[in-house]
Amino acid sequence: MEFGRIFFNPSYSGNMFPGNGDSIFQGARSVMNIEESTKKRPFFSMPEELYDEEYFDEQLPEKKRRLTPEQVNFLEKSFEEENKLEPERKTQLAKNLGLQPRQVAVWFQNRRARWKNKQLERDYDQLKSSHESLLSNYDSILKENEKLKAEVLSMTEKLGAKESAGEPVPCQNSDPLLMVASHAPALQISVKVEDRLSTGSDGSAVVDEDCPHLLDSGNSCFPDNEYTGYATIDCVQSEEDDGSDDGGNYLSAFVGAEQEQHEDGEALGWFIWS
DNA sequence: TTGTGTTTTATTGCCTCC
DNA sequence: GGAGGCAATAAAACACAA
């Protein structure tokens, strides 16, 4: 027979509400029917009790039992205060609840695991909605892009008509896209993406399907932008989640444009990257 | 009543820290 | 090396539909 295993003591009724002044359940006993308590309350024996003759005469070892709602409530409150269990607190809780310290430790262990799972679910939901929102933004940007292209096309046609009619053309650059760029030298799109995926000390990293290679450092995947001729795309990696809600990632796509110049500084036109 | 899925309690084994 | 944490897992308890 294995020591430390759990046995049911049907005659048990006192340990749970010892009435010694420091039990939280002094007044709670009325919640539970006495008969029920003597029939169903769990008891986790000490090893020496396993050799108690009387014990074996009258009681059969039984399987594990659930904690009472009162015990669970108290443990929940304690968990809310602090989800880690120092030895002193464990002993005190065990004493107050009439449980073995080991049970209290196990309960906290399992409770932390449940909390972590819930947290992962929440993170997933948030990430999902962020993704949907980004997709929606992307769609509208695509539409806008199509609209602008059509506009450019129409302007090009008008320009061509003027050129063939011998009229002077103000812009030196013949590429209509570059003309558009000259009106809007830089377009910056910055979308905040909540990062709640990572939790506690073992949070997971966010992997962006679209630019997974960008996500390891939070730095630009392109050379620094000190030289304006580079576009910058930043996919900032997840941060350690400290429980506060202020952590956030920014997906920033910076589409830059540079004005090409002659050596003498005379502007030739705009280049645009994407 | 019974079959099945879910939740809770507990164990095991491995890892890290002091 | 011992204590404590975590992931994985077992198994009992529970919930619920058929």
Image (cartoon, coloured by chain):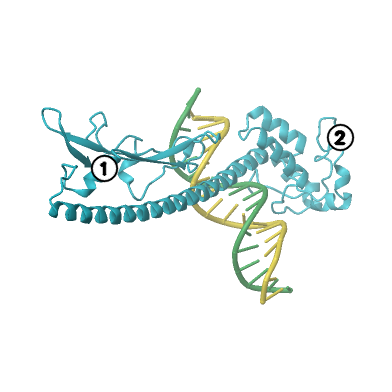
Chain colours: A cyan, B green, C yellow
**Mark 1, residues whose alpha carbon is within 10 Å: few (<14), some, or many (≥20)?**
many
Q: Secondary structure at mark 2?
A: loop
The answer to which of A150 and A109 lies nearer the viewer is A150
Q: Callout 1: helix, strand or loop? A: helix
* Residue type of the residue flagged with mark 2: Gly
Viewer-proximal residue among B16 and A60: B16
Q: How many marks?
A: 2
Residue drawn at (32%, 41%), measured in percent from left and top? A214
Chain under callout 1? A
Instruction: Give the quadrant of the C terminus of chain A.
Output: top left
Q: Chain of mark 2?
A: A
Please tell me the numbered disc located at residue A181: 1
Picture quadrant where residue A20 is located = top right
Question: Looking at the image, which is closer to me, A81 or A216?
Answer: A216
Q: Callout 2 environment at 10 Å: few (<14), some (14 to 19), or many (20+)?
A: some
Residue A65's spot in the image, x, y percent? 72, 51
Of A140 and A77, nearer the camera is A140
Q: Inspect the image, locate mark 1, and give the three-letter code of the amino acid beneath it.
A: Ala
Q: Nearer the viewer, mark 1 or mark 2?
A: 1
Q: Quadrant of residue C14?
A: bottom right
- Residue at the spot x=54%, y=49% of the render? A121
Identify the disc placed on residue A19. Answer: 2
> Mark 2 or mark 1, which is nearer the start of the sequence?
2
- Answer left or right for A123 relative to A211: right
Q: Position of residue B11 (x, y in %)?
A: 59, 47
Question: Would residue A261 be found to the left or right of residue A197 on screen?
Answer: left
Instruction: Identify the residue at the far left of this view.
Output: A263
Where residue A89 appears, as percent x and y from the top left, is 68, 30
User: Mark 1 and 2 residues: CB-CB less than 8 Å, in contact?
Assistant: no
